[in-house]
Structures are given as structure tokens and as C-alpha cells.
Image (spheres, rainbow, N blue to C red):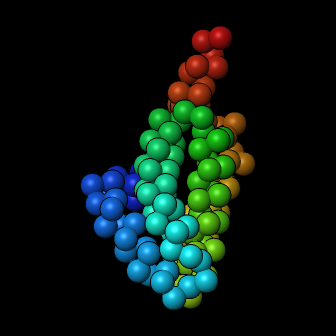
Amino acid sequence: MLGHGLVRLPKIVAFSNGMVAKFSESMIPSFLVEPFGYVLTIAEFLLGVLLVLGLFTRQALTGSIITMMLLVLGSTMVENWTVINSQLIHAAVFAFLLWHTNYNNWSLDTIIKNKK
């Protein structure tokens, strides 16, 4: 997540415009696609930072799963079947990690919890 957001931040306008072009033949209107390109880039970056830090881990993993679900939906709308496998694997990894957050010993969440 962090890597995707990080490389897209400097070219966020071009990325969003590219998404509009890719979705021009889909049933999703461009007035929804364009802002989603901006939100997706920022969300991937922020969720990635939170996951790396281990801060708000459960919420970040839940947000990451929702992001992957939206990406699968979008890939389906443009019939980009080759990337769906990767997106589903990402979602499965995030779900696995969410299921095992009780082993999150080195996270900021755990450090903060133990100081209370």
C-alpha cells in the first residue's frame, strides 16, 4: 500500500486522468472515477504508513481490504481480469493480518496500549 501511494503521489493528477481514460468505456461515470483516483492515491499512502507503523492497525487493515474490494470492482468494470488475482491476494493477506492482530507485538498500537 505504501509503495503504491508513494510512487503515485508525485504524479497524482496524471494517475487520476489515466484512470478516467481507462474507465471511459465502462459504466462508471468519469465524475466518480476522477476523484477516486485522487482518493485512492492518498488512501494507499496513508494506509501504508499506518500499517508500517502499526498504528490503528485494525482500522488500517479494514480500510485496505475495502480498498482492494473497490479495486476488484473497478477492474471488473473495465474487464481487466489479469490484475484481479493480485488484488484478491492482497485482500486475503490483509484479512489474514487482521485476523492475527493479537500478535502485533512491535506495533505502536501495542506500545501505546502497554503505557496505559
At which x and y percent is residue 96? Answer: 67, 55
**In the figure, is residue 46 to the left or right of 3?**
right
Q: Is residue 41 left or right of residue 61?
A: left
What residue appears at the point 44 percent right and 81 percent down from the top-left corner? Answer: 22
Rendered residue at 40%/66% (across/down): 16
Q: In the rendered image of this protein, does residue 66 appear above or below residue 112?
A: below
* Residue 44 appears left or right of 113: left
- For this orientation, the residue located farthest to the left is 10
In this orientation, does residue 11 appear? Answer: yes
| Residue sitting farthest toward the front | 31
Q: 40 and 5: which one is in front?
A: 40
The quadrant of the picture occupied by the C terminus is top right
The x and y percentages for residue 110 are: 60, 26
Residue 85, visible in the rendered structure? no
Percent from the top left, x then y, of residue 82?
A: 51, 85
State whether residue 12 is above or below residue 57. Answer: below
Q: Position of residue 92 (x, y in %)?
A: 65, 63
Q: Residue at x 60, y 12 (%)?
A: 115
